[in-house]
Amino acid sequence: MLVANWKMNGSKSLLLEWIEVIGSSLSGDEEQDLIFCPPACYLSIASDLINKRNLNIKLGAQDIDPNLETSLTGGINGSMLRDLGCKYVIIGHSENRANGESNSLVNKKIKSSIKNGLKIIFCIGETFSQRKKRLTHKILTNQITKGLIGIKKLNNVLFAYEPIWSIGTGVIPKNVDLEKNIIFIKNKLRNNFRLKNAKVLYGGSVNPKNITILKKINTIDGFLIGGASQDSKKFIDIVKKTVI
Ligand code: PGA
């Protein structure tokens, strides 16, 4: 799985160009494991373009509002995202957590997404200072257990391990450390949530150069790509080097 997370970037013209280049450069097989998450305001156009070109790419939102019933100015809920053709939604990204999103809100968002038939890309990860204090596993445990309270069916949840100190910095963890943390997450999900085959992606400064190192870690099930995903050429390069 490769997730293109545009964050709060892009424009209508970039979107048109991106889909055109991706559509003409990749085969259906290469496209099938791609999840494209543009800003919410572009989801509708992206959905139309993907359908018109008959592409295999899945569409995802970058966030969701968990309230279905209340009136909320500016809110976008799961049924709207489904209506636009979204299959996935990113939840718990560190940039949103830094803006005050708590584990309990993350939990509500996950529940609301499941209710609306959306698959979830659930982001977890530690800060640089937490890592220095050797708190990584404690933080991951906390995010996983609080984020998943009361959720029994986890088959539609993908996990994205994103060390915060790696996001947008150009720095990636050493393969041994990354592998240790991915295995820790998988074991936690197996032991505490009876999820045998959890899919865990890695996110943080993935680019066409370091992908050749990262893809050697065979416990990683995919990548969440921010900055490098906006450039169609870089993204295609990553796809070609990853999808066999
Ligand atoms: P990055 O972002 O690839 O720009 O580091 C990853 C992410 O935050 O999703």
Image (cartoon, grey):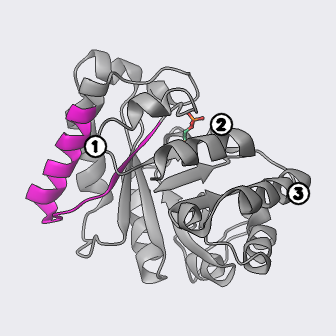
Amino acid at circle 3: Lys
Which residue is denoted by mark 1 in the rendering? 218
Q: Secondary structure at mark 2?
A: helix
Amino acid at circle 2: Gly
Q: CA distance from mark 3 to mark 2?
A: 17 Å
Question: Does residue 63 appear left or right of residue 217 in this picture?
Answer: right
Which residue is denoted by mark 2 in the rendering? 227
Mark 3 vs 2, N-terminal side: 3
Q: Secondary structure at mark 1?
A: loop
Which residue lies at the image location 18% right of the left edge and 65% below the top edge? Answer: 195
Amino acid at circle 1: Asn
Residue 229 painted magenta = no
Residue 190 painted magenta = yes
Q: Give how far across and how far down residue 136 sits, in percent.
A: 26, 30
Which residue is denoted by mark 3 in the rendering? 12
Is label 1's Cβ within 8 Å of ligand 1? no
Q: Nearer the viewer, residue 17 or 47?
A: 17
> What residue range appears in magenta?
179-203
Is label 2's Cβ within 8 Å of ligand 1? yes
Q: CA distance from mark 2 to mark 1?
A: 23 Å
The image shows residue 243, relative to residue 241, as above or below, that is below
Mark 2 vs 1, N-terminal side: 1
